[in-house]
Image (spheres, coloured by chain):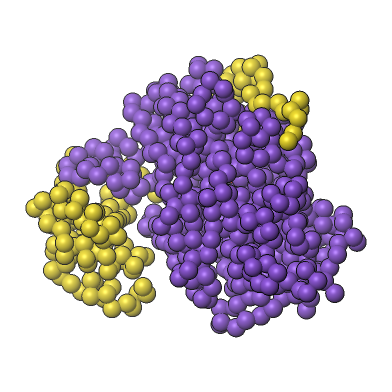
Chain colours: A purple, B yellow
Amino acid sequence: MKADVLIVGAGASGGVVARRLAAAGFDVVCLEQGGWHDLDEFPAPRPEFELMARKQWAHSPNDRALPEDYPLNEDDSDIATLMFNGVGGSLILYAGDWSRLHPSDFCVRSQDGIADDWPISYEDLRPYYEQTDVEFGAAGLGGDPAYPAPFEPPYPPLPIGAGALRVARAHTRLGWHWWPGTNSVLSVNAGGRRACAQWGTCLWGCPEGAKASTDHTHWPQAIRDGAKLITGARVSRVLVGPGGLATGAQYVTEDGAEHVQEADVVIMAANAIGTARLLLLSAGPGHADGLCNASGLVGRRLMVHPFANVMGLFDEQLRTWQGHIGSKIVSYEFYETDERRDFVRGAKWSLAPTGGPINAALPTRAGGSTWGPDHHLHMRSYLGRGVSWGIFGEDLPDPENRVTLDAELTDSSGIPAPKITYRVGDNSRRCLDFQIERAKESLLEAGAYAVEEERLMRHSGWHLIGTAMMGTDPERSVVDGYGRAHEIENLYIVDGSVFPTSGGVNPTSTIAAFAARTADHLIATRNGQRVPA
Amino acid sequence: MSASDPTLGAVVADDELRDRLRRFADALIPAAHGMPAAGDVGVADGQLDKVLAVRPDLAEPLARAVADVDPADHLTSLARLRDRDREAHDALLLVVVGGYYIDPDVRRRIGYDGQQPVEVRPEIIPNYVEEGLIEPLLARGPVYRAVDDIERR
Ligand SMILES: Cc1cc2nc3c(=O)[nH]c(=O)nc-3n(C[C@H](O)[C@H](O)[C@H](O)COP(=O)(O)OP(=O)(O)OC[C@H]3O[C@@H](n4cnc5c(N)ncnc54)[C@H](O)[C@@H]3O)c2cc1C
Ligand code: SF4
C-alpha cells in the first residue's frame, strides 16, 4: 500500500521524524536494513565483555561484518568511518555525548571567510534542541556559559567522578572553561526507562536502556501511533516517476526478494554515508550522476571530525573503567576562532573514562614493548588511573573528501558498497596540535604524573557529516534549510548529510533537532506538498 | 566463522599449538610482582576455550601466529609478525590478554571487579557545587562568540 511518507533508515533522525509524523496522523512506513536488539543482548555484564566489544559490537561495520552491515572500502581514507545498522541506528553504539552546536557554527563563512554559512541559525534550532533534549532525556547542568541562555537540560547531571573533579579544579585554577557534560543518558527513571547504572559500557550497547536510542525513545510510540517499521529491508534505489517526483523505493529482503514501497514523500535518514550511497545508486535517465546531484555535491564534503586523545595518569585509583562514557565534563575554552593562532575555528574537549583491563593491556594503550615482568607494573600504574580528554576539531569541508560507489565491493545483497576518500586537512592538523598541547597542560595542572597522547586516531569516524549539504543556491547545495531536495520537491534528507559545516561538537543533538524541525515543517505544509499522481 | 568451523575444531584439539602458545604467553606475561604467569592461569588451556567460545573468528589467525612466533625471542618475533600479518599479531595478543584478564583470580589481584552497576544519586549535591567551582565560571560570563551582529553571507 502507498504510504504518505517513506523513511529510509530507523536510526536517530529516522526515529525522530517517524514519531512526529505518526503522531500527526501521517501514514508512515520505514525501511531499515537491520533488526531490533534487546537489552540482554549487550555484552556489558559478561566477563568476556571486552572481547565481544571488539567483534560482535565493534564500531566498524568492516570488523563486525554482519549480514545487515554494508562493507566500506577505506583504503583511501585516513580515518575509519563507524556506524551501526539496526533499529536505533548508530545510537545503539554511540556514547551519548549530547552537545548542541554553538551560534558561531552556523556562520563560519561570515566570520572566518571560509567554508559556508548554514541557511538556518542557532535560534532557528533552539526550540527543537529544547524539545529533543526532552525526547532523548538529556542530563546536564543548566546555565553553561558556553551557550546563550536559556540552556537548561531537563534532567540533573550525571556524576562526574573523582578524576573529572581533579580536572575541574585544575581548570578553575587555570581560569579555563569547564562544565559538567550533557549526556543523553537518564540520571533518573523517566518515561518508562531506567536511570543510568554507571556500567561504563555505553559504546557497546546500554544494558539498562538508560542511554537514549530511538528504538526505546521514539519507535515504540511511533508504532503505537500507526507507523510501520519493516526490518531486514535494504533499500537499493529511490524511485522517481515521469513527473520528476520521488514515488518510493525499491528494497531487498533477507530472502533476496525485491519489493517496492510507494509513497507521497520520501525521507532519507540513512546517515551521511548511507544516504549519499543511495542517492548515487539511484542514478537513471535524467539524473545520470545520481539523484538530486545537479550541483555535483552528493557524496562530497564528507566530514568526520579528526580526533585526538590526551590521557593523564594519576597516582590514585580512580576506578575510571566505571561510569558513563560520553562526557564527564567538557571544555569549550579553545572552541572559537582566535586570530593569534595558525588555524581557524577550534575544538571541543570531552573528558572520558579509560576502560577495562584488556584495553589497558593491549599495545594501543600499553605500547609495543610492555611485555615481560614489567607488564604487571604497567597495569598497576594504568588501570583505573587514567582520564582522557577526547578532542574533536572542526573539520572544514573539502569536496575531495567524499563517498563514491566502489567498482567491485558489494554488500550481502550484491548492492555496490561505498568507497570513502578522506584526508585530514591542514587546518585540522594545526588545530589538533594546538589543542593537544593545551590538554596536556590541563592534565598536568590536575596532578597527572604522566600524559600520553593519541594523535589522529584512525578508528574515530563516529561523526558522519556533510555529503548532501543544505543551502539556498541549488547550484551550490543539495537541499534547502528544511532538508528538501532542490531538484525533487517531495524528497527530504534529515540526517547529518545536510550539515554545510561540521562544527566541533558531537552532531547527534543537532541531527535530532534538525529532523524534528523538518517533520514539523512537513506537517505544517502538508496541504501544499506536491505528490506523485 | 561459526562454532562448528573446522579451523576452530583443529585449533581446540591441537596440543602442539597449545604448548607453543603457553610458552609464548609466559614470555609476554610471566609470573612476577605477585601476579601469576599467563600459562598458569590457563591462557592456552581452559581460558583459550572461553575466549574462542565468544570469539571463534580468532582461531584461524591465532593458528597462523603461533606457527610463526618464537617464545625464545618474543619481542623480535612479535614485531616481525606485526609487520607481516597484522591480523595474526592482533589475534595472538587478544587471546593471551583476553584469556588472562577474564580470569576471576587475576581480576581480584588487580582490583578490577568487572563492569558493575552503581546507583546514580542525583539528589546528592555534587562536590564541584559544594566546593564553589561553578561560581567563577558564571562570574566570567559567556565564553561563546555572539553572532547577532554578523551579516550572514
Ligand atoms: C561508536 C559511536 C559513538 C558515537 N558517539 C556519539 C556521541 O557521543 N555523541 C553524538 O552526538 N554522536 C555520536 N555518534 C554518532 C551518532 O551515532 C550519529 O550521529 C547518529 O546515530 C546519526 O543518526 P542518523 O539518523 O543520521 O544515522 P544512523 O543512526 O546511523 O541510522 C541510519 C540507519 O539507516 C539504515 N540504513 C542505511 N542504509 C540503508 C539502506 N540502504 N536500506 C535500509 N536501511 C538503511 C542503517 O541500518 C541505520 O540503522 C557515535 C557513533 C558511533 C558509531
Ligand atoms: S553507563 Fe549508563 S548509559 Fe552507559 S551503559 Fe551503563 S547504564 Fe547505560
- Is residue A237 at least partly visible in the picture? yes
**Which corner quadrant holds the C terminus of chain B?**
top right
Q: Position of residue A364 (x, y in %)?
A: 33, 45
Q: Residue at x 52, y 50 (%)?
A: A401
Return the residue nearer the eye: A128 or B23: A128
Q: Residue at x 32, y 37 (%)?
A: A382
**Res A12 → quadrant:** bottom right
**Res A347 → quadrant:** top right
Q: Position of residue A266 (x, y in %)?
A: 74, 65
Q: Position of residue A398 (x, y in %)?
A: 55, 45
**Res A287 → quadrant:** bottom right
Q: Residue at x 27, y 75 (%)?
A: B7
Position above or below: A368 against B84: above
Return the residue nearer the eye: A67 or B25: A67
Return the residue nearer the eye: A461 or A67: A461
> What is the tally of numbered marks visible in this picture?
0
Return the residue nearer the eye: A100 or A317: A100
- In the displayed orientation, state which residue is furthest to the right: A527
Residue A522 lies left or right of residue A301; in this view the side is right
Q: Residue at x 55, y 34 (%)?
A: A348
Q: Position of residue A192 (x, y in %)?
A: 68, 54
Residue A188 lies left or right of residue A82; in this view the side is right
Residue A72 lies left or right of residue A239; in this view the side is left
- Is residue A207 at least partly visible in the picture? no
**Which corner quadrant holds the N terminus of chain B?**
bottom left
Position above or below: A10 against B79: below
Residue A354 lies left or right of residue B10; in this view the side is right
